[in-house]
Amino acid sequence: MSAPVPPPPAGPVPYEPALALALLADMVRIRRMEEKSAELYGQGKIRGFLHLYVGEEAVAAGALRALSAQDNVVATYREHGHALLRGMPMNAIMAEMYGKQEGCSRGRGGSMHLFDAATRLFGGNAIVGGGLPIAVGLALADRMQGHGERVTACFFGEGAMAEGAFHESVNLAALWRLPVLFCCENNLYAMGTALERSESQPDLCAKAGAYGLRTARVDGMDVVATHEAARLAREQVARGDGPWFVEFQTYRFRAHSMFDPELYRDKDEVAQWKTRGPIHTFTARLKAQGLLTEEQYLMIERAADEEVARAVAFAEAGTWEPVEHLYRDLRTRNGGPGAA
Ligand SMILES: Cc1ncc(C[n+]2csc(CCOP(=O)(O)OP(=O)(O)O)c2C)c(N)n1
Ligand SMILES: [Mg+2]
């Protein structure tokens, strides 16, 4: 029951070479880190859950480059790319995925719980829709504390829009005109459930618009489109005009997680979407315009591979948290630290 796949993104890239190459490098860094993560998972080095973003890189790359360093970011369990582009060192991400104490959450969270107060990344969240009320709370706190210019960008899958948390969150955000940029990563599936099997209103902008949010729908495989949409929406949110909802229409090229036989979609559909891949289509456009040479592309890839190799070495050399730390961070009933 799959819908026709649109043609690949094309056309001139309206950017100076520096921005164009930075967007490309952002996507390549995510792709290479995640391809390595999949390999490490196969070797049993990374365990637990692992949800890859392969195919969706143009969303994080375009949107995050539209934010200021002071903005808040809230993401899902498919958040390695968001963490990386937000500025979390790849070493800390890889060590966290290994479960080593040098990871950003001391190895206690793993892949789904990347968190970094320094770069204002408020997770990573294993709960579908769990980030939405957190984003609204952050935006409300900013309003109350007088951080008028700050925007909270909240990334979530289209599957979260069938959750109660979505309705409660967008309702309050719209009612109180809070500075939230709702970024829906619509990859058409929530695990094995296609959008039209779970949504009575499959037009997601209409659904968000019903709460009074301003909305935009954009090709999530085209990093120019994602960047432009996010930039315009962020500007308006920062002006105090209330929340925006941007639907990024994207596709994941790999399984939902590492345990998914993918029985719910045709191989043909996946192959067709791969022709829309955000990295190779953007590369071809840049080359056609004379903004990128093959040599430059290879340098970007090599730099990403070297960064990945360093991160893996860092994680390998990392250490396990000692067992005496078992009660660290636990709170007792009276609110004090747990007995060690
Ligand atoms: C509250 C809740 N319900 C169910 C799950 C199990 N679950 C994990 S991922 C997922 C699919 C979510 O799909 P979507 O929001 O579209 O994000 P995507 O994985 O496609 O990026 C589900 C149902 C969960 N983690 N949390
Ligand atoms: Mg989805």
Image (tube, rainbow, N blue to C red):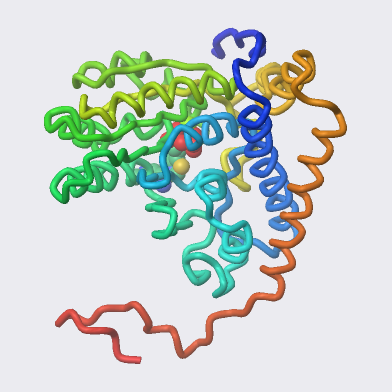
- Is residue 266 shown left or right of residue 101? right
- Tally of marks: 0
- Above or below for 10 versus 260: above
Residue found at x 71% / y 71%: 316
Q: Quadrant of the C terminus?
A: bottom left
Question: What is the residue that sits farthest to the right in this orientation?
Answer: 295
Q: Is residue 117 visible?
A: yes
Q: Quadrant of the N terminus?
A: top right
Residue found at x 44% / y 85%: 325
Task: Determine which quarter of the picture holds residue 40.
Answer: bottom right
Task: Determine which quarter of the picture holds residue 215.
Answer: top left
Q: Nearer the viewer, residue 13 or 161?
A: 13
**Residue 209 in picture, x, y percent from top left:** 25, 17
- Is residue 176 shown left or right of residue 271? left
Task: Determine which quarter of the picture holds residue 44.
Answer: bottom right
Q: Is residue 190 visible?
A: no
- Above or below for 294 versus 312: above
Q: Nearer the viewer, residue 36 or 4?
A: 36
- Above or below for 237 versus 108: above
- Is residue 18 shown left or right of residue 141? right
Residue found at x 37% / y 82%: 328
- Is residue 327 shown left or right of residue 111? left
**Residue 20 in picture, x, y percent from top left:** 65, 27
Residue found at x 12% / y 33%: 176
**Residue 52 in picture, x, y percent from top left:** 60, 43
**Residue 319 in picture, x, y percent from top left:** 62, 79
- Above or below for 25 versus 2: below
